[in-house]
Image: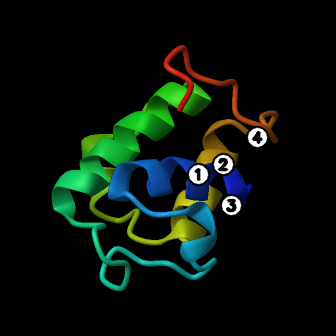
């Protein structure tokens, strides 16, 4: 599941997906700041047709945690549904 997450995050922070390590965290990835984190969360909601509660956004600070969350919210979705804007 990391590949769709990396693709979305890379688009937001302006790097190549392969530059994002599997253990990426908001504190260690250049460009992944609080504003980009919110953009990432909004993109995940659109991509996977899920809703992330405001209280949970602050806790989703690594790809591991985000992957677990997305799988729990949309377990039948092993691949993203795709977005109309192609991201």
| Image position, residue 18 (x, y; %) | 63, 70
Which label sits in the foreground, 4 or 3?
A: 3
- Residue visible at 53% across and 32% down? 87
Question: Can you identify the residue that label 3 sits on?
Answer: 2
Q: Residue furthest left?
A: 35
Quick check: 84 left or right of 15?
A: right
Q: How far apart are marks 3 and 1 (CA)?
A: 8 Å
Sequence-first tag of 3 and 1: 3
Q: State yes or no: discs 2 and 3 in contact (Cβ < 8 Å).
A: yes
- Residue at x 45% of width, y 48% of height: 11
Sequence-first disc among 4 and 2: 2
Asked if residue 41 lies left or right of residue 17, the reply is left
**Are the two marked residues, 1 and 2, in contact with CB atoms closer than 8 angstroms?**
yes
Query: Depth-wise, is mark 3 or mark 1 nearer the camera?
Result: 1
Pointer 4 and pointer 3: residues touching (CB < 8 Å)? no
Count of marks, rendered view? 4
Residue at mark 4 to residue at mark 3: CA–CA distance: 14 Å
- Residue corresponding to mark 4: 75
Residue placed under numbered mark 1 in the picture: 7
Quadrant of res 14: bottom left
Query: How much space separates mark 1 and mark 2, taking CA atoms?
Result: 5 Å
């Amino acid at each position: 599941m990391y590949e769709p997450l990396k693709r979305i995050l890379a688009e937001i922070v302006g790097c190549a997906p392969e530059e994002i390590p599997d253990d990426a965290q908001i504190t260690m990835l250049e460009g992944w700041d609080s504003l980009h984190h919110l953009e990432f969360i909004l993109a995940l909601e659109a991509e996977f047709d899920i809703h992330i509660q405001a209280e949970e956004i602050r806790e989703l600070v690594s790809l591991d945690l985000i992957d677990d969350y997305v799988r729990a919210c949309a377990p039948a979705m092993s691949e993203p549904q795709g977005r109309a804007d192609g991201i």
